[in-house]
Image (cartoon, coloured by chain):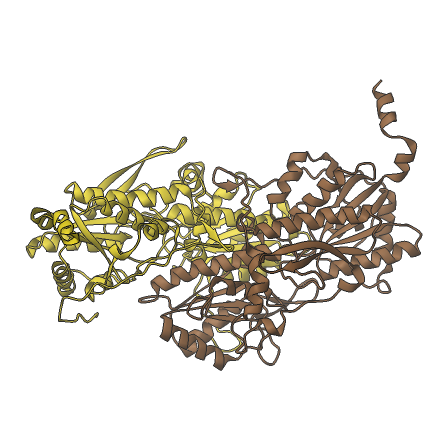
Chain colours: A brown, B yellow
Amino acid sequence: MAIVRITLNVPAEKTRLTKNAFYAQSGGVTAVINATACGVLESARKHKNKIGKVLAGRNGILGALTEDLIDTSKESAKAIAALRHTPGGAFGSARYKLKGLEENRAEYERLIEVFRAHDIGYFFYNGGGDSMDTAHKVSQLSKKLGFPITCIGIPKTVDNDLAVTDVCPGFGSVAKYVAVSTCEAALDVASMAKTSTKVFILEVMGRHAGWIAAAAGLAGTTPAEPPHVILFPESPFDERAFLTRVKHSVQRYDYCVIVVSEGVRHPDGRFLAESGKRDAFGHAQLGGAATTVAAIVQDHLGYKYHYAIADYLQRSARHIASKVDVEQAYAVGRRAVELALAGENAVMPTIIRESDAPYRWKLGHVALGRVANREKKLPRSFISRDGFAITPACRRYLQPLIVGEDYPPYRNGLPAYVALKNKSVARRLKNKFVLT
Amino acid sequence: MAIVRITLNVPAEKTRLTKNAFYAQSGGVTAVINATACGVLESARKHKNKIGKVLAGRNGILGALTEDLIDTSKESAKAIAALRHTPGGAFGSARYKLKGLEENRAEYERLIEVFRAHDIGYFFYNGGGDSMDTAHKVSQLSKKLGFPITCIGIPKTVDNDLAVTDVCPGFGSVAKYVAVSTCEAALDVASMAKTSTKVFILEVMGRHAGWIAAAAGLAGTTPAEPPHVILFPESPFDERAFLTRVKHSVQRYDYCVIVVSEGVRHPDGRFLAESGKRDAFGHAQLGGAATTVAAIVQDHLGYKYHYAIADYLQRSARHIASKVDVEQAYAVGRRAVELALAGENAVMPTIIRESDAPYRWKLGHVALGRVANREKKLPRSFISRDGFAITPACRRYLQPLIVGEDYPPYRNGLPAYVALKNKSVARRLKNKFVLT
């Protein structure tokens, strides 16, 4: 009887139509990348006639290359729903950029080999510009190798540097964290300035683009209100102008709040924070723009200072996530599945802004080739003429992105974040793939 | 008609009985010191037959010494109520410790001169151990100089190092911030560890006592859960044991989360944060304990690391304040007024713990002489035998202090913190006091 029922539920033509999906998180994680995973998984579960199981890559694309797949069908609906309010990468992410097709075609062929072995017909890749490039290449190669797979990129990055989309999920929450933290720390410094700390420096992320630093500008609306100085990677560091500005702020307002992007450079191109080390992508490893700025203030002006380095706290702070950001992160995940089912391929969902105030947005999509490996910097028109503040245009852009709170549930004073079971799928391939 | 009404409301005998109160904030501010101010002001306003106006010291005790007083009666009830959810010090605080009576008696005499000029009969001093000492000395001198004044100390410090009281208002919120941040950043690192950051270091406050570092221990309940290593100021830094522990954590769990107190010292007594190095520009390397720990990990184990320095963010993070802490901060403010009106003098309200689980507390009070200049360190029984974790006893103590959320209202994505008008009281003294 049970056997009959199963047979009835899985007719032959449906089995042929149904394909599994692969989902992976890539690059630095965010406070809301799991909200996107939640959108993908919840939508896929609604279309079981087309998408069988969603298999997630353990540690991102490495999971595909090494056939280390997670069976998300083992997770309860409740656990999947809790991803929406859980930061970090629930399946593990990876900083691993696939090389060009010519340089390492074997990697792409391996992906397709694994996808074939696990009957995967959908490839959802959740990451930044590099990842959109990978998804794009997989879509090209699959055609050549006669293994059709639907490739959908899903935007994610705190850096907000993806092209075409109005904003990247992950950015709104880090923007809110930075604006709120600037506002709070500034109240602290303002009350201590008479006898103690006069200069407070907050170092934020943003290697090439000053979007995150710019978000701190939302904390104040007049020159008297903090932050008094923002140092953007887009503006070469002008020590003299900077010191004049700090001195002016302390003389006029009794204190000075400085927000510095980790990516700020000297006019000769060296990072303020350069440590001489390089990461897996070959990017210079940074750390300590705040320290350098503090030393400059100390040496030239002698003011008592304090500095904070937000580092991972800023991009994992789900407790103060932007509601708009969470909604958009979920929406792009859901839309990725809808696009795949609608027959789209090699595209990425985008967020299209319809108006600033009231803020209205809708989803669109773009060909992966148009976003792969491109970097959207802060427009020059978003930085004030003197290089130390944001413009009204920048404020109009940023303001709606931090609106609304979306608090996680709490248990015993701590957020009730979910840890998935992450059960492995049995391996089907005999050959092991050695990562280079 | 209006004049008649005023005359009726202020009968002669009431005028004689009514005295103004002085309130000042002292030392490093917290996320909830203004909740205490709110408790003081709202309670005082309910007893206008005894307390006329509450005059606040602009920049703490400096405001009294320089006769720079703020008339809090000019603030609306709504603005006062909003203090409950506003971090920083609403009237300005000061790091200014009055010297001993013998060394600088003039300062104490000046305080009394100012109090006399403004008809102040109540002295509410909101601070840590030093401030309780000041309040105690003022109470002693006022008797000798024949100027009766009721002196009440009100506990405040993120360091949780005040004697007698079970906990200090301000600590619960920083504890919650640190526990939540550790938990969130750990989720981030765990998902990146395979190909990127393996070691994450969070530097927290606590120059002499490890209470704040200990609070990070609430983020995990088993050895596998972060933080994997806590470095307390109470335990001399044992580099070898530390490295063994970090290596073990990375080998076993793939990553290691370290929380380091700014006050950790080498066995010879030097702070870890004193690097004594200079950077490429010849600037003094202003290290932090986190930087030193990162360098040690890098030099000996070579793991990729990231570090965050929470600094002022941790003590101003009203957005993630502990509800218990906010309630206690308000309660000690209200009780301070009640104690004064009940005829108590030279005392400080305390928090008395009645049970851990369920958590029950009540208010008590203690003579200022018993808390002045004393420092409560983390008990040895709260630190694990190996020196790198908290014990179950410590967890039982800390756990209830971070329970509950008390979110501020938001406007346009940012907390709606209040800025008071802070109108000055007209000066009545001709002589100026020069601070030494």
Left or right: B148 in relation to A424: left
Q: Is residue B228 visible?
A: no
Left or right: B19 in relation to B358: left
Q: Which residue sits at x=50%, y=72%? A: A292
Q: Quadrant of residue A269 in the image? A: bottom right
Q: Give percent across and percent down for residue A71.
A: 75, 39
Q: Which residue sits at x=12%, y=53%? A: B140
Q: Which of the pair A351/A409 is nearer the observer?
A: A351
The total of numbered circles placed on residues is: 0
Q: Which of the pair B386/B333 is nearer the observer?
A: B333
Q: Give percent across and percent down for residue A114.
A: 84, 47
Q: Give percent across and percent down for residue A111.
A: 83, 51
Q: Which residue sits at x=49%, y=57%? A: A180
Q: Which of the pair A363/B166 is nearer the observer?
A: A363
Q: Give percent across and percent down for residue B305.
A: 59, 58
> In the displayed image of the protein, which residue is found farthest to the front?
B1
Q: Is residue B397 visible?
A: yes
Q: Which of the image's four quarters has the C terminus of chain B?
A: bottom left
